[in-house]
């Protein structure tokens, strides 16, 4: 049995971590903490476990084996490193941290303490992406020549239900759409292709979002990235908080033998179009949109089960900190590229 502590009891804890720990017969939610104590108390009423008075009190409890870090971005690194040094396994939400040095310190802390560190790159666990990766690996689309991957919706105001969420504040979030949404797609491209980005050319800007006083938000709301991968493929990753219509969570991989269309068709989560003209449509579940999650539609992301399996069975973590760091390097490289108005070697 894995005894778990929840640090940060906001939206992602409520909609993903707590329900999925609750559903896993090998996990028990034992401790909850949030800087807003009523939130931890409310979640304790719904999912069990005891509200603790501080992060330190959770980390000092020898009964707690693992923690989920679901606080705002600026706090990820310090909480994660403290938890690993206290001997806990950690599932930390994305974006991993707000500096590359902190990402490296997190991975080093996991290694020196012999603990599992996973990052919330849950798109790796979606059926469509998992099967797509198998098809790429088995050579169904040949060598990948190019790709495009988009993640855009109307912004974190809808997700949090607040007109001025912390996501807009550079001091707490550090980055906007690029690391809120783009990080998922950068990591996904690494996962699907088995390659890593080696070069980035990007424009990362604030096009529309404003604070209630009318001033632009202090993080980006749009990111346009052109990436070159280690295997030679070139493609785009686009992240946006200003898609004021239907959410776009789509990816296409273009290979020498065909095309894979992932989550870009209203009916089929995965379509393989072969150069020969053959088209295979896969009957697998689509990834949940933010809107569907907020409306209470349930579908396991799978990341909590994988975290528990990695700790209890010693299985290889699928979204380990040591993998996530490569995607974070691309985020920081894209920001540098945008600032300098030039292509950056990663
Ligand atoms: N994997 C995903 O798809 C996904 C989706 C949404 C959010 N997230 C990430 O999850 C994290 C939390 O986002 P959210 O949407 O739940 O935000 P949220 O604002 O709903 O929740 C954050 C919670 O953390 C608490 N908090 C803030 N600082 C804290 C601290 N130092 N210690 C303990 N609690 C603290 C807040 O009071 C709040 O309850 C963010 O980093 C976000 O990027 C990931």
Image (cartoon, grey):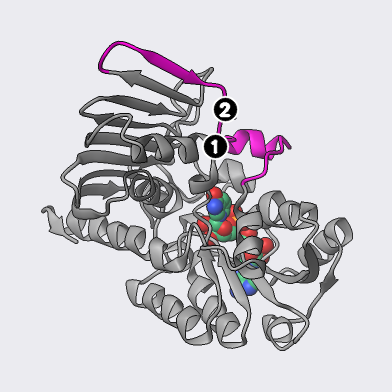
Q: Above or below — where is 326 with respect to 81?
A: above
Within 10 angstroms of label 1, few (less than 14), some, or many (20 or more) residues?
A: some
Name the spot of residue 101 as percent of width and height, x first: 34, 77
Image quarter for ligand 1 equals bottom right
Question: Can the viewer see residue 164?
Answer: no
**Which quadrant does the C terminus fall into?**
bottom left
Name the foreground residue: 175 vs 144: 144
- If you read the primary sequence from the N terminus, does the residue marked by circle 1 or circle 2 appear first? 1
* Highlighted magenta segment, given as a residue range: 275-301
Q: Main secondary structure of the magenta part?
A: loop
Label 1, label 2: how far apart the Cα atoms are:
7 Å
What residue is disc 2 on? 284
Name the foreground residue: 98 vs 233: 233
Q: Above or below — where is 112 with respect to 232?
A: below
Name the spot of residue 30 as percent of width and height, x first: 81, 71
Q: Above or below — where is 233 with respect to 321?
A: above
| Residue at (34% x, 45% y) in the render | 189
**Which quadrant does the N terminus fall into?**
bottom right
Helix, strand or loop under label 1: helix
- Residue 127 marker: 1
């Amino acid at each position: 049995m894995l005894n778990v502590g929840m640090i940060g009891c906001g939206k992602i804890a409520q909609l993903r971590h707590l329900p999925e720990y609750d559903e896993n017969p090998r996990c028990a939610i034992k401790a909850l903490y949030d800087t807003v104590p009523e939130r931890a108390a409310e979640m304790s009423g719904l999912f069990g476990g005891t509200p603790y008075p501080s992060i330190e009190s959770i980390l000092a409890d020898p009964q707690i084996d693992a923690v989920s870090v679901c606080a705002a971005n600026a706090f990820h690194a310090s909480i994660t490193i403290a938890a690993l040094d206290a001997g806990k396994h950690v599932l930390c939400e994305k974006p991993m941290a707000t500096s590359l040095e902190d990402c490296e310190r997190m991975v080093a802390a996991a290694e020196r303490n012999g603990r599992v560190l996973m990052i919330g790159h849950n798109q790796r666990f979606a059926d469509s992406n998992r099967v797509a990766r198998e098809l790429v690996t088995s050579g169904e689309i040949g060598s990948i020549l190019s790709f495009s991957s988009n993640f855009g919706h109307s912004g974190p105001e809808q997700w949090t239900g607040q007109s001025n969420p912390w996501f807009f504040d550079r001091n707490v979030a550090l980055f906007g759409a690029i690391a809120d949404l783009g990080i998922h797609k950068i990591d996904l491209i690494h996962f699907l292709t088995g390659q890593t980005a080696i070069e980035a050319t990007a424009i990362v800007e604030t096009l529309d979002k404003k604070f209630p006083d009318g001033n632009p938000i202090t993080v980006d709301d749009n990111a346009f990235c052109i990436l070159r991968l280690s295997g030679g493929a070139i493609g785009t990753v686009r992240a946006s908080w200003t898609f004021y219509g239907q959410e776009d969570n789509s990816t296409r991989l273009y290979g020498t033998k065909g095309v894979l269309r992932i989550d870009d068709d209203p009916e089929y989560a995965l379509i393989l179009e072969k150069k020969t003209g053959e088209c295979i449509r896969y009957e697998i579940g689509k990834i949940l949109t933010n809107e569907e999650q907020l409306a209470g539609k349930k579908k396991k992301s799978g990341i909590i089960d994988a975290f528990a399996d990695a700790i209890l069975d010693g299985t290889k973590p699928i979204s380990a900190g040591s993998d996530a760091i490569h995607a974070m390097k691309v985020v920081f490289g894209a920001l540098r590229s945008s600032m300098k108005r030039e292509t950056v070697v990663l």
